[in-house]
Image (spheres, helix red, strand yellow):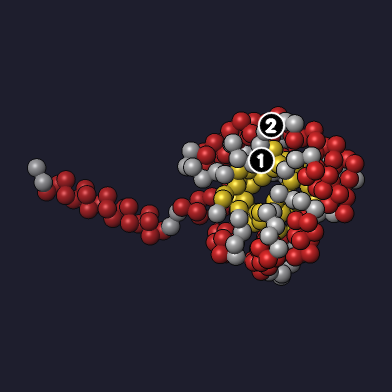
Amino acid sequence: MKFFLDTANLEEIKRIVKLGLVDGVTTNPSIIAKEGADFKTRIQEICSIVSGPVSAEVIGLTAEEMIQEGREIASWAENIVVKIPMTEAGLEATYQLTQENIKTNVTLIFTEAQGLMAAKAGATYISPFIGRLDDIGADGISLVKNLKGVLQAYGFETEIIAASIRNLDHLVQSSLAGAHIATIPGSILPSLWNHPLTTSGIETFMKDWGKLQGTVS
Ligand code: G3P
């Protein structure tokens, strides 16, 4: 399973790159706004740190606007993926940009039908939003599982990015459901490697080591 970081925070990205965990980065307008940075500058900064795919989202709502923006965004760096919302206009833009060999990530996927349409339009990636489905009492993990089944059954090359991940269980269940990629927010990073028994185990080892130092000359 590949790990993307769902952030535009440079310090966070640099810190996790050092751990060898970053296969790519995803952003959206909310994530960029949170950083208060210039969109193009920040995306180019991220692309200089991460060699894997970096998703940057269009703002336009018509197909023409999305296609123009998508071409512009794709010219910013080699590893850009143009993120496009799942609408009729988004499907048209996805289809057109795919013809131009521009990679796309169709986002805000909440149903199997939406995922299948995006894959048919040629999306490189589709992003089902697990957390937001759970928020309304639906089952985001089942969506990932079903999408994987559909993509496999018909031989699509489109990859599933499990998005809107809010906790460790979402991540683990997404991997079991067959998501190709999970995009992870900074807020859950510590839970990926911390465990209370690891912490107490280290404390015990250190205490016992200290005792040994007192008895051996
Ligand atoms: O990857 C999509 C993500 O940024 C949305 O997450 O927590 O706002 O639903 P959330």
Camera-nearest residue between 161 and 100: 100
- Label of residue 26 in the image: none
Assess mark 2: CB under 8 A from ligand 1? no
Q: Amino acid at mark 2?
A: Ala
Residue at point 64%, 41% (across, down): 53
Tell me if 174 is positioned left or right of 76 in this view.
left
Answer above or below: position of 50 versus 2. above
Answer with mark 1 or mark 2, whichever residue precedes in sequence. Answer: 1
The yes-or-no answer for disc 1 within 8 Å of ligand 1 is no
- Residue at the left extreme, as displayed: 217
- Find residue 65 and report its image quarter: top right
- Per the image, label 2 sits on a secondary structure element best described as loop
Viewer-proximal residue, 196 or 32?
Answer: 32
Q: Are marks 1 and 2 in contact (CB under 8 Å)?
A: yes
**Residue type of the residue flagged with mark 1:** Val
Residue 181 seen in the figure: yes
Residue 194: x and y, percent? Answer: 45, 54
The residue located at (76%, 35%) in the rendering is: 73
**Can residue 170 be seen in this snapshot?**
no
Residue at left offset 48%, top offset 38%: 18
* Residue denoted by label 2: 77
How crowded is the residue under tag 2: few (<14 C-alpha within 10 Å), some, or many (20+)?
some
Location of the N terminus by quadrant is: bottom right
Position of residue 185 measured from the top left corner of the image (x, y, whole percent): 61, 49
Q: Is residue 173 above or below residue 186?
A: below
Question: Residue 54 got which mark?
Answer: 1
Front-lying residue, 10 or 121? 121
**Left or right of residue 208, residue 79 in this image:** right
Left/right of residue 191 with respect to residue 70 in the rendered view:
left
Residue depicted at x 46% and y 52%? 193
* Mark 1 neighbour density, 10 Å: few (under 14) some (14–19) many (20 or more): many
Q: Position of residue 10 (x, y in %)?
A: 60, 35
